[in-house]
C-alpha cells in the first residue's frame, strides 16, 4: 500500500459527516482526479474485507466512508501507525510509536498486539512500557494494565494532549521526536495550519519564538485531529469566563472558525478556550514592556532573593527585570491553566549552570508556598538562562578585574606613581592598596588578593607574586602581561585543588559503593555527614525531599544532591563512586557528590559547582576518576588532574 493510499484513507476516516468531492481529495493529495478514482478502487475491497463499512460514491455528491465508530477508530489507528517498511525500529522510535498508539487509543491494546506489531518479545515490551509509564506520571497520566483486556492510559484529555505534543521528553531526543510527530499529519494539514498561524501573527503584529510557534502548530493540529475523533477538551465555566477576558480568546475563535471551514469540522467552546490558553502562554519576541502587577512583584521578588543569596547585584540589572517580566507573563498563564512547557535544553542547563539552577529551585520552593504556585523545573531552567545572562553582563561590566596589592619599599610618592601607571596600563587590575613589606601579612589576612606586585623580593609567599621595577618600563609591562596570562591558565586548576583539599576527607569518600537506588545513596551519604558532625539530623530527610523536587543529575553520569544550607553545621562533601550505574531521574549515574557547603562563602559554593560541571565535560578524566579503588586514590586523582 502506497503512502498516498494511507493519506486518502485517513482523510475518509476523519470525515464523520458529509461528502468529499473527488477534486477536493485530488487537491489535498496533489494528484489528478483519475488517480483518486483509481485509489478508491484499490481501497474499496480492502474496506469490505477488513470491516462492515462501505465506501459510498454518489454522482453529484461525492465520496463518503460509512462505518461504525469502533471500526473507524480501529482503522484509524492502523493507518496512523502502519509503516511503509515493516522493519524493526530503533528503541527510541519504538518508544515513540508505542506511546503515541496508547495515547490516541480509545480502547485497551493487548500485549500480544503491541509486541507482534513491533516485532519484539514480551520482556522487551515490558521494559518499554515501564519507561513509558515513568514518563506518563510526569504528565499526570498513568498506564493501566488489565489481564486478558489489555493496556490503556488513564487521565484527562488535557494531559493526553500535553503528552502528545511533548513526546520528545520521553526519549530526550528532539531530532527523532519532531519528525515522528510530523509524520502523524498530512503535509497539507501542516501547511494550512502554519499559514493561518502566520496570518494571525501578521494580523495582530506579534511574533512568537520559533519554539512557541512550533508548539502552537502541533497543539492546533491535535485540536483538529482529536475533535474529529470526538475526544474534546473540557474547561470549567470559571476557566471559560477567565479566558474570555483575554484578547487571545477572540484570536482563537477566529482562527478555529477559519480552520473549521477548511477541515470540515466544528470546534466546541472548550477547544476555543484551550487554544486561547496556548496563545496566552506562548512566548513572543519583541514584546512591549509588560506591567502586570503580579508579574512585576514576582520578578522583583526573584531578583531580590537571588541578590541576597549570591551577593551579586542582580537588582541593578534593568535588562534582567525586563526579561523576567516577558517570560513570567507567559509562564504564569501556563501555570495557572495547567499548560505544560517542554524545555529541550533542560538537561544541558542543569549541567552547565548547576549553581544558579539549584538556587532557583530553592527560591521557587519558598515562593511556591507564598504565591500558591507550582513552578516546574522546565520553567526554572528558562529562568536560569535569564540569571546566567545577567551574571555575564555583570562580569563584562566589571571587566573581570583582578584584585592586587602593591608592595613598594620607596615611600608614598613612588607607590602612588606605580599604582597610577598600573591602573592606566592594565585596566583589568583593581589595586586594593599600596603597602610596605612588613604590613603584607596582616593585609592578606583581611583581604582577598589574586596576586601581589612587589618592588622587592618576597620570601615564603604562597600567593602568586611578581617583582618589577617601580618605574615600570616597557620590558616590565610585557613581563607583567605574560605573568597575568599564565596566571589565568593555572588559576582554575589551583582553585579546584584548594576547594577539594579543603572540603573533601577520605573517610567521606565511598568507592565501589553498591547502591541500587538514588534515595539509598543520598541517605547513606547524608548519614555519613551527620555522623561526622557536618550536618543536622534533619539534613538527611531534607536532601531526599530536594531530590524528589527535581533530579540533581547533571549529565555524564554525575549527580550533585544536597539539602537546605540552614541545616549545615560546617562545610563538607561526601562522595560515592558506584559499582554500577543506577537510574537517577532520566539518567544513569555512577558518581555522586553530596554537597553540604552552607553559606560560608557564595564564591566558594559557586566555584565548586563550576568545577564539578567542568568534570562532566572531561570524559577521559571522569572515566579515570571512577576507576579508582580507594578513597585516597580518588582524592589524589581529583587533585592531580591539574597536571594531567
Image: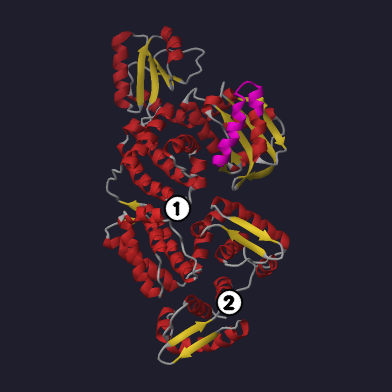
Secondary structure state at the residue bearing disc 1: loop
The magenta stretch spans which residues?
527-552
Mark earlier in primary sequence (1, 2): 2
- Apparent side of residue 95 relative to residue 248 in the rendered image (left or right): right
User: At x 50% / y 89%, what residue is drawn?
Assistant: 38
Which one is nearer the viewer's eye here, 563 or 139? 139
- Name of the residue lying farthest toward the bottom: 59
Q: How far apart are marks 1 and 2 (CA)?
A: 33 Å
Report the side of 82 relative to 32 (left or right): right
Residue assigned mark 2: 71
**Quadrant for the C terminus in the image:** top right
Q: Quadrant of the N terminus?
A: bottom right
Disc 1: which residue: 339
Viewer-nearest of discs 1 and 2: 2
Q: Is 157 in the magenta?
A: no
The chief SS type of the magenta part is helix
Would you place residue 125 above or below residue 402 in this image?
below
Above/below status of 86 relative to 293: below
List x then y, in percent, for residue 140. Answer: 54, 52
Image point (48%, 75%), residue name: 14
Which secondary structure, mark 2?
A: helix
Does 533 lie within the magenta span?
yes
Amino acid at each position: 500500500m502506497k503512502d498516498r493510499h494511507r493519506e486518502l484513507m485517513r482523510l475518509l476516516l476523519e470525515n464523520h459527516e458529509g461528502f468529499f468531492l473527488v477534486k477536493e481529495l485530488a487537491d489535498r493529495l496533489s494528484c489528478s482526479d483519475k488517480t483518486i478514482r483509481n485509489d478508491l478502487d484499490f481501497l474499496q475491497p480492502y474496506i469490505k474485507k477488513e470491516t462492515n463499512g462501505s465506501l459510498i460514491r454518489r454522482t453529484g455528491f461525492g465520496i463518503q466512508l460509512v462505518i461504525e465508530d469502533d471500526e473507524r477508530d480501529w482503522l484509524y489507528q492502523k493507518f496512523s501507525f502502519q509503516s511503509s517498511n515493516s522493519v524493526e525500529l530503533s528503541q527510541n522510535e519504538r518508544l515513540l510509536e508505542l506511546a503515541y498508539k496508547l495515547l490516541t487509543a480509545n480502547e485497551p491494546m493487548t500485549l500480544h498486539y503491541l509486541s507482534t506489531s513491533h516485532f519484539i518479545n514480551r520482556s522487551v515490551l515490558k521494559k518499554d512500557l515501564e519507561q513509558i509509564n515513568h514518563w506518563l506520571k510526569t504528565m499526570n497520566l498513568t498506564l493501566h494494565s488489565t489481564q486478558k483486556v489489555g493496556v490503556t492510559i488513564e487521565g484527562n484529555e488535557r494531559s493526553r494532549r500535553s503528552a502528545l505534543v511533548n513526546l520528545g521528553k520521553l526519549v530526550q531526543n528532539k531530532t527523532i521526536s519532531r519528525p515522528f510527530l510530523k509524520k502523524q499529519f498530512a503535509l497539507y494539514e501542516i501547511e494550512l495550519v502554519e499559514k493561518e498561524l502566520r496570518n494571525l501573527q501578521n494580523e495582530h503584529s506579534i511574533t512568537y519564538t520559533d519554539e512557541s510557534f512550533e508548539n502552537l502548530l502541533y497543539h492546533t493540529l491535535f485540536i483538529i485531529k482529536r475533535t474529529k475523533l470526538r475526544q474534546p477538551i473540557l474547561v470549567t465555566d470559571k476557566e471559560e469566563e477567565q479566558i474570555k477576558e483575554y484578547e487571545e480568546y477572540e484570536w482563537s475563535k477566529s482562527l478555529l472558525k477559519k480552520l473549521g471551514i477548511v477541515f470540515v469540522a466544528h470546534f466546541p467552546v472548550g477547544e476555543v478556550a484551550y487554544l486561547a490558553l496556548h496563545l496566552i502562554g506562548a512566548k513572543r519576541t519583541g514584546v512591549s514592556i509588560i506591567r502586570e502587577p503580579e508579574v512585576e512583584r514576582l520578578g522583583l521578588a526573584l531578583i531580590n532573593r537571588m541578590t541576597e543569596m549570591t551577593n551579586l547585584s542582580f537588582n541593578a540589572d534593568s535588562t534582567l527585570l525586563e526579561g523576567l517580566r516577558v517570560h513570567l507573563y507567559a509562564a504564569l498563564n501556563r501555570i495557572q491553566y495547567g499548560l505544560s512547557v517542554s524545555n529541550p535544553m533542560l538537561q544541558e542547563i542543569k549541567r552547565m549552570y548547576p549553581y544558579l539552577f539549584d538556587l532557583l529551585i530553592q527560591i521557587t520552593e519558598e515562593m511556591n508556598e507564598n504565591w500558591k504556585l507550582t513552578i516546574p523545573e522546565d520553567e526554572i531552567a528558562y529562568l536560569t538562562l535569564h540569571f546566567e545572562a545577567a551574571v555575564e553582563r555583570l562580569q563584562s561590566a566589571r571587566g573581570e578585574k583582578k584584585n592586587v596589592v602593591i608592595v613598594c619599599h620607596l615611600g608614598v610618592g613612588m607607590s602612588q606613581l606605580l599604582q597610577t601607571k598600573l591602573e592606566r596600563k592594565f585596566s583589568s587590575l583593581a589595586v586594593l592598596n599600596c603597602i610596605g613589606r612588613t604590613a603584607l601579612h596582616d593585609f592578606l589576612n583581611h583581604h582577598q588578593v589574586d596576586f601581589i606586585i612587589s618592588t622587592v623580593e618576597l620570601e615564603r609567599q604562597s600567593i602568586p607574586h611578581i617583582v618589577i621595577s617601580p618605574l615600570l618600563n616597557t620590558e616590565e609591562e610585557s613581563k607583567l602581561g605574560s605573568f597575568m596570562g599564565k596566571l589565568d591558565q593555572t588559576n582554575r586548576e589551583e582553585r579546584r585543588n584548594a576547594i577539594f583539599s579543603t572540603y573533601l576527607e577520605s573517610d567521606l569518600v565511598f568507592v565501589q559503593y553498591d547502591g541500587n537506588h538514588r534515595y539509598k545513596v543520598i541517605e547513606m551519604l547524608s548519614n555519613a555527614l551527620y555522623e561526622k558532625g557536618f550536618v543536622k539530623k534533619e539534613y538527611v530527610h531534607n536532601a531526599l525531599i530536594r531530590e524528589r523536587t527535581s533530579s540533581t543529575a547533571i549529565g555524564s553520569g554525575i549527580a550533585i544532591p544536597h539539602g537546605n544550607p540552614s541545616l549545615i553545621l560546617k562545610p563538607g562533601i561526601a562522595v560515592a563512586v558506584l559499582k554500577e550505574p543506577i537510574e537517577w531521574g532520566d539518567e544513569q549515574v555512577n558518581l555522586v557528590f553530596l554537597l553540604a557547603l552552607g553559606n560560608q562563602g557564595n564564591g566558594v559554593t559557586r566555584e565548586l559547582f563550576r568545577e564539578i560541571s567542568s568534570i562532566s565535560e572531561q570524559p577521559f578524566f571522569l572515566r579515570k576518576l571512577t576507576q579508582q579503588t580507594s578513597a585516597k586514590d580518588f582524592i589524589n586523582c581529583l587533585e592531580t588532574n591539574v597536571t594531567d
